[in-house]
Image: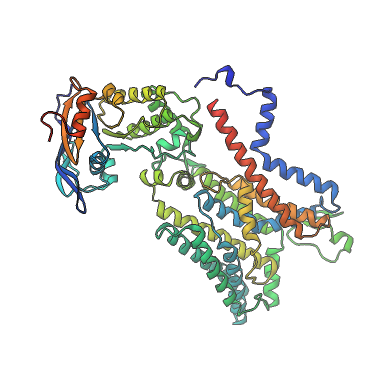
Amino acid sequence: MPSTAPILTCSGVSKFFGGLTALDNVDFEVSQGEVVALLGDNGAGKSTLIKCISGVYKPEHGQITFNGVEITNHAPSEIRDRGIETIYQDLALAENLDVGANVFLGKEKKKRFMGLFPVTDDEFMRQEATKVLDRLDIHIPSLKQKLVNLSGGQRQAVAIARAIYWNARLVIMDEPTAALGVPEQRKVLALIRSLRDQGVPVILISHTMHDVMAVANRLVIMRRGKVAANLPREGANEELVVKHMVGTAEGAL
Amino acid sequence: MTVSAANVPKGSPARDRVLDFMAQNWAYIFLLGMVIFFSVTGRGFLTLANFSTLLVTSTMVALMAIGQTYVVITAGIDLSIGWTVGLSSVICARVMRDLINGGADLAPAILIGVVLALFFSLIPGLVNGVLIARIKVPAFIATLGMFGIVRGAAFLLTDGQQIVGGLPNNLQDALRSVGSGSLLWWVPEQGIVFLNRPTDLPPAITRGIAGLLPYPLIITILVVVVFGFILSRMQFGRHTYAIGGNQEAAVRSGINVRNHLIWIYVLSAFTAGVAGVLHTFRFTAGVPNAAEAALLQSVAAVVIGGTNLFGGEGTIRGAVIGALIINVLSNGLVILNVNPIWQFVVVGVVIIIAVLVNQAQTALERLKANA
């Protein structure tokens, strides 16, 4: 279990959309070595919270610090440079390109052609992609394959590989198993554990209770823009979580 | 992923390989088939002189198709280049003519004409790019609007004439020496001759003279090589594909998609501008509607060459093959004495076949990958 100081701290974060309070004074922490599941009904504020963390939204109140640095008003690209990678449901991969090109998208490794023209070093990028996929224990038969020809789980792996290749120090995953078959879901859950074990904490948004129970160390349940409960995995069960989600648990707000 | 025995497609592997090869390279096979067909059936098709003419004629569509390929890979379309070619041609002819009539020397007049023509042809591209990338006007609408604007501009510059003519004789000769010139000539009974096309020969021999390396072809090959290299090997090309594959992913990975798209439309206008200048050199006149028909042919060439109209796929090589297929068809049908109107029908059929083959190929690829 985590014993270190939190790597990410959100304190008193509020976000309004017109008259709607999307986040209401939210406190949220993530420490090294944990997988935190972020749960809640639709509209509970999970997505708003991760968008505030990744810089897509600016909170009206509150502070977000990462590794001791305040990042509340940083641009998304800056936050990504600091090591917070968000893997969205749609993965944001160029499916018409191969694995190496995707891992290096926007940051292509170049070499000189005839000592003169800068060309993309596809061989290097492919090899680096293989290394990082090996680290995650993922094997893709041909790395020259375009992503469109890979399975959903393999694409998910590519998205994760890209994040950790660029030294992600915190990975946020939005419904990573939603579109996958059962064997692939298992693979992705294994990936999440493997990320955690390599010192990269994960925030996992999921509706699938089974996934949450399988990988999370801690469950944060949101309801109507507030944190309704913050439970360790031990002792939590589906019934309790649902009660917190709908607001009928003992001591619920 | 392991391949289970049940999923292995039926049929011998050798036949599959042949089918696969044909699906991958059908455009080349089709081109070769047509060349053979017309060589057998059409008298005068398979001659050096005809091939030289055919290649030079193809340069217009090929040049336009190069820029169009970039545009279509980003899931756009550029309809304005049909008139950008004309604008470039008209500016080129008019600037040269007016400078020389004003007393300028030949060489600087030609140079300034070419530079200004290329420069002004970039403007419609820049405006297209800004409209599409920054103001989010759909490419079809933005370039359709530009189609009208550039068409008007080109005709305004001809003072309402169908052509900018009346070029001084010395200028016409100079233009012709490039536009109709060749680095090497094949002369029947004499062999290969450098630079100057021999004159004062009997008509029977003159008819057989063929430019082996016509300048317009050399220039086009240069443009093909440069832009083909950029697309297939350089970061600019990689980003072009990424934008076409998933624009959102490109944005999130830090690619400056807006600026990139602007460059793409400028590039498209540039290759059209080169086509316009070449047209003026070849015909020693500025012709506003020089590429009226070539516009749709450029789109056709791109599609025949395997570029996906939804973006993300395509090659310059394919576009060039597409341009050649269209021109071999036109040329061959003329030689066979077929009513030229049939060209439209035939090219139309070929486009539809091209799209069908490409779809089948994509489906096949996916099947194989999932097997």
Position of residue A93 measured from the top left corner of the image (x, y, whole percent): 42, 39
**Do we see residue B212 in this rendering?**
no
Vertically, is B90 above or below B237? Answer: below
Specify the color scheme. Answer: rainbow
Position of residue A171 measured from the top left corner of the image (x, y, whole percent): 28, 33
- Can you tell which quarter of the image residue A77 is in? top left
**Do we see residue A204 in this rendering?**
yes
Front one among B336 and A126: B336
Q: Residue at x 25, y 41 (%)?
A: A43
How many marks on residues? 0
Along the horizontal axis of the image, is A203 left or right of A142?
left
Q: Residue at x 41, y 55 (%)?
A: B259
- Can you tell which quarter of the image residue B315 is in? top right
Along the horizontal axis of the image, is B289 left or right of A68?
right
Vertically, is A149 above or below A60? Answer: above
Vertically, is A9 above or below B250? Answer: above
Q: Residue at x 61, y 46 (%)?
A: B317
Front one among B224 and A73: A73
Point out the residue furthest to the left here: A251
Point out the residue furthest to the top here: B5
**Picture quarter with the C terminus of chain A:** top left
Along the horizontal axis of the image, is B206 left or right of B8?
right
Front one among B229 and B256: B256
Position of residue B302 measured from the top left corner of the image (x, y, whole percent): 60, 50
**Picture quarter with the N terminus of chain A:** top left
Point out the residue furthest to the bottom here: B102
Position of residue B237 measured from the top left corner of the image (x, y, whole percent): 49, 46
Vertically, is A100 above or below A185? Answer: below
